[in-house]
Amino acid sequence: MTRTTPTPDLAPEFPMPRSPEHPFDPPPRLREAQEAGGLSRVRLWDGSTPWLITKHAHQRELLRDPRLSADFLRPGYPSPIRIEDKSTFISSFPLMDDPEHNRQRRMVLGPFTVRKVERLRPFVQRIVDEKIDELLAGPNPVDLVTAFALPIPSLAISAVLGLPYSDHEVFERNSAVLIRQDVPPQERAEASEELQHHLDRVLGDKMTDPADDLLSDLGARVLAGEISRPEAVDMTVLVLAGGHETTANMIALGTLALLRHPDQLALLQAGDDPSLAETAVEELMRYLTISHTGMRRVATEDVEIDGQVIRAGEGVVLATSIGNRDPDVYDGDPHVLDLRRPVKQHFAFSFGTHQCLGQSLARMELQVVVNTLYRRVPTLRLATALERIPFKHDGIVYGVYELPVTW
Ligand code: HEM
């Protein structure tokens, strides 16, 4: 194929609109960009024109390339959040480079290993069962987001951190503000401050009265001089926000996708294949790839990829939602939800040094949900038309604001 250098002047705006008829699919223009060779340019809210990477192979190469930085303070970093003043961002290791990124990441990694997460499975099974009991005893129809999708990951991450679940209103409300693309600066600053203030108080309590949880562990590291108290607070904010909003969106959007694909839902309800939950969760993750604004990086040196040079200082947007639908990687039709599809590497949790810290926890929670909810509530169905469901087009994470269901 003859390659032409993508023209920044003609770059389309990003994020692009999704098709209302196909709300589970990435925007049609992303597919066109992938079919045209995978390397192009887009225009962001601030007028910058970073590279857009849409092919799975290119994403794989670039996400593990140390010449691409996740440091949001570097000039050229293509911020998904529409904000000029970066000082109001909560800065922590997800937006830093190694070695400091890795030093801080290792401080919070402990509870999220596969082994530690497996120990939490009975607890998660219990809260899923309890929430379904409450659902069945409560009003019908109900919003599945508030009644089920949000409480499960909030309860789980609260337990890991050692945060009282009674605090959930404060952290859910403020985290929801932080992950929107376009929020008035004042509102963003207030949400950050309220969260930081609240978590600082809990951290202080843990420093005087420690328990067996992540916040107590971070408190001990502060006392030992390994990190500052504000750093520990900001790490907690990101683990907390990452730990509930994302999984909640997967539970709600995944349920909606299954309700719209009854043949696939029936496979889960049949319950005759114990390994199905695992492959089903991977396929739902791949198919839905809820990172709506893609992975963001900036080149620190010139990087050559497939005959094109990304110059030092240029931004890079890796649209993993379309990378995870790349026909060169996935057999059959990658745009079809097929819960029996053999699991192949997907980037719904990203790849490389920043790949999701909480992926084992998210996977386990989602496996428990798909193994339990649809069998215990076999008549679960939408209580409204698909067109009336409010999708999160304005988030950095895709999902639904509400999911009215009945049974
Ligand atoms: C279905 C649920 C989830 C999805 C789709 C998801 C997605 C992602 C993605 C795509 C990244 C990488 C961003 C990048 O490369 O720039 C990431 C990083 C991260 N996630 Fe998750 N996540 C989920 C659940 C969780 C949970 C349960 C936690 C709880 C601890 C968590 C905590 C984090 C943290 C702390 C990072 C930053 C890692 C680093 O920079 O080293 N996530 N997540």
Image (cartoon, rainbow, N blue to C red):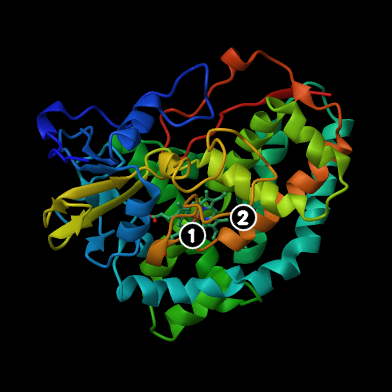
Residue 277: x, y in percent? 74, 50
Residue 234 visible? The answer is yes
Residue lying furthest front in this view? Answer: 1
Q: Nearer the viewer, residue 232 or 308?
A: 308
Q: Is residue 14 shown left or right of residue 273?
A: left
Q: Is mark 1 within 8 Å of ligand 1?
A: yes
Residue lying furthest bottom in this view? Answer: 224
**In terms of secondary structure, where does tag 2 sit?**
helix
Q: Is mark 2 within 8 Å of ligand 1?
A: yes
Q: Quadrant of the C terminus?
A: top right
At 61% across and 53% down in the image, what residue appears? 343
Q: Amino acid at mark 1?
A: Cys
Q: Is residue 342 above or below residue 116?
A: above
Q: Nearer the viewer, residue 82 or 328?
A: 328
Residue placed under numbered mark 2 in the picture: 362
| First in residue order: circle 1 vs circle 2 | 1
Q: Amino acid at mark 2?
A: Ala
Residue placed under numbered mark 1 in the picture: 356
At 23% across and 45% down in the image, what residue appears? 78
Task: Answer whether labels 1 and 2 touch (C-beta < 8 Å).
Answer: yes
